[in-house]
Image: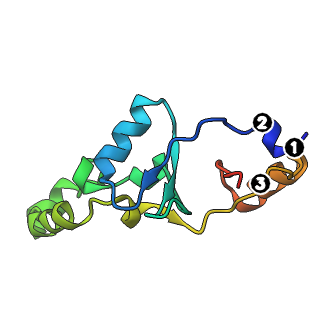
Amino acid sequence: MRAHQIMAGHVITVGTEASILDAAKLMLDHHISGLPVVDAAGRLVGILSESDFLRRSEIGTQRRRPRWLRFLHGSGSAATDFVHERGRRVGEIMSYDPVTVTEEAHLSELVGLMEKKSIKRLPVM
């Protein structure tokens, strides 16, 4: 079996300049756990996955400081405000240089790459 026989037919993508909130909404609306990220010319430049959203203060998933540490050092709101203002684009949190395969790649090659690279998404080019 080859990649073109098992790949998804319609692929939803997101641009590097899209907000991470829009990307998260796109993933939720389409019930998907990852998105290929494309540049302005439509070339694949990265992958955005659920794990890329972990611990992001702009969407409320950041690691919380222990209560005693907040008491000693303050809330850290200046740093949080900085992240809220500047860390909002897909290109800032995506994984770069995704591993890809051709349509003719054998299933055994796909499985081997996914295991070796510890990845869950393998774009077919």
Residue at 26% x, 64% y is 87
| Callout 1–callout 3 Cβ contact below 8 Å | no
Query: Which class describes the residues within 10 Å of circle 3: few (<14), some (14-19), or many (20+)?
Result: few
Residue 94 is situated, as x and y percent measured from the top left of the image, at 46, 61
Horizontally, residue 75 falls left or right of residue 39, namely left
Q: What whole-number distance in Å separates the C-alpha atoms at marks 3 and 2?
A: 18 Å
User: Is the residue under label 1 in contact with that under label 2 (CB below 8 Å)?
Assistant: yes
Numbered disc 2: secondary structure: helix
What x and y, as percent, mark residue 40? Answer: 43, 63
Q: Disc 2 residue type?
A: Ile
Separation of residues labelled 1 and 3 (CA atoms):
17 Å
Q: Which residue is mark 3?
A: 115
**What residue would you read off at disc 1?**
2
Assign the N terminus to one quadrant of the image: top right
The image quadrant where one finds the C terminus is bottom right
Few, some or many residues within 10 Å of mark 2 (<14, 14–19, 20+): few
Find the distance from the CA under tag 2 to the CA under tag 1: 7 Å
Q: Which residue in the structure is indicated by mark 2?
A: 6
Q: Residues within 10 Å of mark 1 (few under 14, many from 20)?
A: some
Question: Which of the 4 quarters of the picture holds residue 86?
Answer: bottom left
